[in-house]
Image: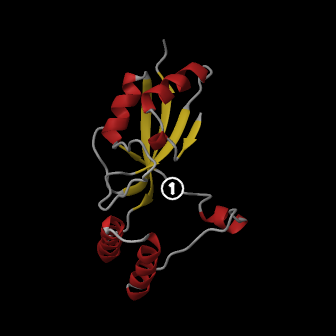
Amino acid sequence: VLALAVIYYLDLAAFLRECRRVLAPGGVLIFCTPNKDLPGFRPSRFSTRYYSIPELAAVLSQQGFAVEFFGGFPVRKGSARLVDRATALGGTILAALPMRPDLRDRLRVAISRAARYERSFLDGELSEQDMSEVADLPLSPIPGDRPNDAYRVLYGVARPHQA
């Protein structure tokens, strides 16, 4: 079962029960989710819940899965990380301000220009070049017993316990 950027919209326990039901012997569940432990993390307003690594490990274990975690897209270090944190904090503050959405968008653009923050947007479909840039994305094993703020995206490979 492949669940990319979706588990935070679902009842996770119900989803995992269904995964156990449909997985063939030897089958695995592969998922990814944004890392809620990053400073300045902002959840989608349509999500139900985001999980830390220990929370995911606990729910997966309760539902009969053994899981390995991996981190992708390392958080930048030094002054670049400070810029990322400041940008995230600014976005959080901007989102909380009571104003019309069109004014918020114009203010966001003005602040981005002033801070020289470059935003990039994807076209409707990914190009071959887009795909080649992530073809060999390094994933680093990370422990499942504590939160981790070194990676922007968390990946999990979960296998049902044998009955």
Q: Position of residue 32 (x, y in %)?
A: 49, 45
Q: Position of residue 91 (x, y in %)?
A: 36, 69
Q: Does 75 appear above or below 12? A: below
Q: Where does the N terminus fall, quadrant-wise?
A: top right
Q: Residue 9 versus residue 41: which sits nearer the camera?
A: 9
How many other residues sit within 10 Å of disc 1, few (<14), some (14-19) or many (≥20)?
A: few
Q: Residue at x 49, y 16 (%)?
A: 162
Q: Position of residue 85 (x, y in %)?
A: 31, 69
Which image quadrant for residue 3? top right
Amino acid type, residue under disc 1 in the picture:
Pro
Q: Does 78 appear above or below 55? A: below
Secondary structure beneath dot 1 equals loop
Q: Residue 64 versus residue 49: which sits nearer the camera?
A: 49
For disc 1, the marked residue is 138
Q: Does 52 appear above or below 162? A: below
Q: Position of residue 110 (x, y in %)?
A: 42, 84
The image's colour scheme reads secondary structure
Which image quadrant for residue 21? top right
Q: Residue at x 37, y 68 (%)?
A: 76
Q: Is residue 140 left or right of residue 82?
A: right
Which image quadrant for residue 133? bottom right
Q: Residue at x 34, y 71 (%)?
A: 94
